[in-house]
Structures are given as structure tokens and as C-alpha cells.
Amino acid sequence: MDVEQYRTELFNALDTIFEAVSKTTHLAKILDSEWYERIKHEISVASLIPRFTCDTALMFFELRHWLRGDPTFETGQELFFQGKIEEASDEQKMALWLYGPDPLRTLLPLMEERLAAFSALPFKKKEVEGKFKQLRDHRFSMTFYNYAFEVLVLGFFATQGLLIDIEIPVGNGESTVDATIKLDNRPIYVEVTYTSQRILQPLTQPVEVMAYSLEPMIDQVVRKTLAKVNNAKQLALVKGAPTILIVGRNFHGADDIATQEAVQRCFQASEFRNLSGFISSASWHFRKIEFFPSPNAAFSLNEKERQKIRDLKLDLVVIR
């Protein structure tokens, strides 16, 4: 493809994304005109050989779709959203399987809904404003994912009417826990964290077979859990109440298999008895999750609380 034609396509994609974002209330304050001009500048000065790469344009890449505007794809996507995917052609089904639906129709409304619910919390207004400031301050950095994951998790619980507090002091004020939720008749302390470390390197060319060791991935999850549950860390300071750790995974880090093994190892160790449950998210979106109730917790989740988690409106898998 001609480089300048490619550049024009990137500009057009950015314009489409910014137009959609500008129609939102909360995300528009984060991905604002300053964000737009910064990404536009990055595109204008990039060599684009072999493709556009830019660490500061992460949300541009998250909201871009390679087939947006393609008539065949758009028709198949409409069938998908209408629940009529069986009427789609094999080509349309393959395109949806490979690239997924347009994030402007999935990720963007998900983010806006949760940001709105989090913004509307009737308590801790100063802390809420601080979370939004973190998102804006880090919108050009990979650390944006860390802050976005926390707000999207808390925003989700807010949409379900389950979030009752945030930034709760524990251990005589020695530390704070991200949130408390109520699934039955008692508060459950929740800590949220994101595994930003990339263990697998992005592929530069297609390969037929790839082998990798699970141990670094298992260790990634175990270390994240240790950082929140052991040695007088956040959840270790919670007394007399159940706790849940929620871990978001990046695409180049621990996978489902490694996470399951890591969580089972943690549950078998006595130093993790303060952990009542573990929720793993397949990405920073907090859309596809796995739930692991602890069999050995000092304060176990009761059946009603477990069922409430199973009933969450997410693509949920329960690991018993």
C-alpha cells in the first residue's frame, strides 16, 4: 500500500473514532481534543513502514477496526447484533471471528456506561475525581490500562448496585482497599490490580507452532496475588470479613491455564487464607471473567454471595 494512502486511512480512522468519542459525556473528557491532536501529530510524523506503531496511541489502536466501513463486514456485523448470525455468509462469520465486532459499538459504550456509573457514586467524590484525573493524566501511557481496569471494574459493580464504598482504610489506616461490595448482608473487601508485564513478545511474522513455558505466567499471577494478600498488604489487613482479589490480564501475559494453576497454588498455601475469592479478567475491559471461590478461606463466601457472582451480567466461568 502507498504510504501516504495509508496515512490518509489512519487520519480517517482517527476522525471516526474522535467523532464517536466526542458524543460521549465522560470518555470525551479523557480522549479530548488535546488527545486527538497528539495522535494526529504522531500519525503525521510516523514513517509508517512497515506499519504505524506508537506507544502513546494505545486507545487509538483499541478503538480502531480494520474492516470498519467495509460493506460485507458491516452487513455481517448487523446480523450479529440482531442475533441472526446464522444468516451471515462464511466470509462474514470469518471476519467477525478474526477481528471481532467494531469496538466503537462494543468497547466504547461499555466504557462510557461504567464511567458514568462510577462518576455518579453518591460518596467519596474527591476520590472519584482523583480516579478520573489519573485516567486523563495517563491517557498517553501504557499505565492507562492499570487505572482504566480499576475504574471499569468499580464502574461495573456500580451499574449493578453492588458497590458500597471505595478507598477504605484498613489496618489502622496503614493501607487502603480499593472497594467494598455487598452481595448479601455484609461488606466484601475488593482489591483490583492489572498484570501489565508482557511475558510473550508480539509476533513479527506468522508461525505455525509456538511453544512457551507456563511457569513465568504462573509466577506472574502468584506474585500479583502475594502483593495484595500477603505480608501486611491490602487484603491481609482486612479483619473479620471476606475478600476478593480481581486481576486483569494483558494479552501477552498469563493465560487461562496458567491463571487456574496459579490460583490453585495460592489457595493451597496458608498465607492466602485471608483470600475468599479470586476473579480473573481476560483483558482490561472486565468483560470475560473466571471466578475462583477459595476452599480454605478464613472467611468464605456464602452460597448467596457465590450465586450473585455467578449471576453477574458478564461472560463468566466458575472454577470450583
Image (tube, rainbow, N blue to C red):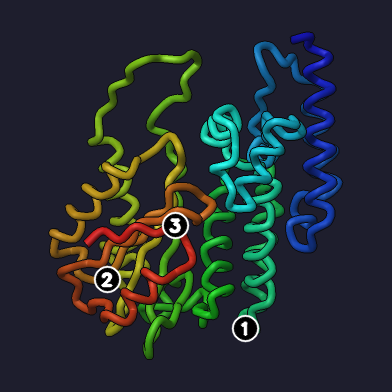
Task: Please report the residue visible at 58 percent of the width from the left and 62 percent of the height from the top.
Answer: 151
- Residue placed most toward the observer, 40 or 289: 289
Task: Identify residue for label 2.
Answer: 276
Q: Earlier in the sequence, mark 3 or mark 1?
A: 1
Check the image and report above or below for 97 versus 187: above
**Please, which residue is most extreme toward the front here?**
87
Q: What is the distance, in whole Å, between disc 2 and disc 3 at their CAs?
A: 21 Å
Name which residue lies at 46% across and 42% down.
Answer: 250
Q: Amino acid at mark 1?
A: Phe
Kindly report the distance in space between the C-alpha atoms of the residues bearing marks 3 and 1. 29 Å
Residue under the image location 78 percent in, 51 percent down: 21
Per the model, the C-alpha gap separating discs 1 and 2 is: 26 Å
The residue tagged with tag 3: helix, strand or loop? strand
Sequence-wise first label, 1 or 2: 1
Please tell me in which quadrant of the rendered image residue 181 appears. Answer: bottom left
Q: Which mark is residue 315?
A: 3
Q: Which residue is mark 1?
A: 123
Q: Residue 301 location in percent, x, y? A: 27, 77
Tell me the crowding category of disc 1: few under 14, some 14 to 19, or many 20 or more residues within 10 angstroms, Cα based: few
Q: Nearer the viewer, mark 2 or mark 3?
A: 3
Give the SS element for disc 1.
loop
Furthest residue toward bottom:
185
